[in-house]
Image (tube, rainbow, N blue to C red):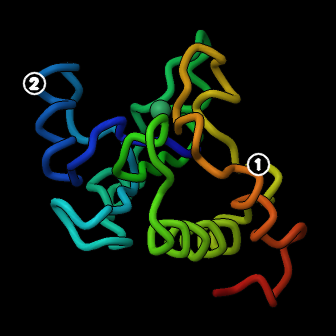
Amino acid sequence: MLHHSATTVGGARTFDKHHRSRNGWDELGYHFVIGNGTDTPDGYVEVGSRWHKQKHGAHCKTPSNYYNEHGIGICLVGNFNKIRPTARQLRSLEQLLRFLSHTCRIPPSRVTTHKAVTGKTQCPGRRFPMAAVRQALPTRLTATSLP
Ligand SMILES: [Zn+2]
């Protein structure tokens, strides 16, 4: 599931701090964070502690909590209501999605956004090019979908 940070700067360490202090969560809510050249280099993929532990996420509240229990949370740093993600962020996202689709056997059709699931947020932002991201993914799981 895709998110934006809705901030101009940031990275896994900053968001981890906010998620603990402001939200009262146990740690960073996302599994992956893709930098925008502020806290981390542009397009740099940070692997969150949840991923290492293969632990549930904390990034998409729904009545059944399905998406937190089963979803993989990916956050791109930036406010994409105002600007578009960088080309490097999008390239890294595409590679990450291909990798996860393949290794976790997730059909690309299951790649979704916070907004598409809850309808209560603009996340990952009005200017996030979801159609292009989806188009860059293979339509089926095949060996050739490896990065
Ligand atoms: Zn979100």
- Image quarter (top left, top right, bottom left or bottom right) of the C terminus: bottom right
Residue 69, horizontal then vertical, whole percent = 53, 33
Q: Quick one: SS at disc 2? A: helix
Q: Earlier in the sequence, mark 2 or mark 1?
A: 2
Q: Quick one: SS at disc 1? A: helix
* Picture residue at 47% right of the left edge, 42% below the top: 80
Residue 81, horizontal then vertical, whole percent = 48, 35
Residue 89 is tagged as none
* Picture residue at 48% right of the left edge, 46% below the top: 73
- Image quarter (top left, top right, bottom left or bottom right) of the N terminus: top right
Quarter-of-image position of residue 116:
top right
Q: Nearer the viewer, residue 18 or 40?
A: 40
Residue 110 is tagged as 1
In the rendered image, which residue does mark 2 sit on?
21
Whole-angstrom CA distance, mark 2 to mark 1, is 32 Å
**Type of amino acid under label 2:** Ser
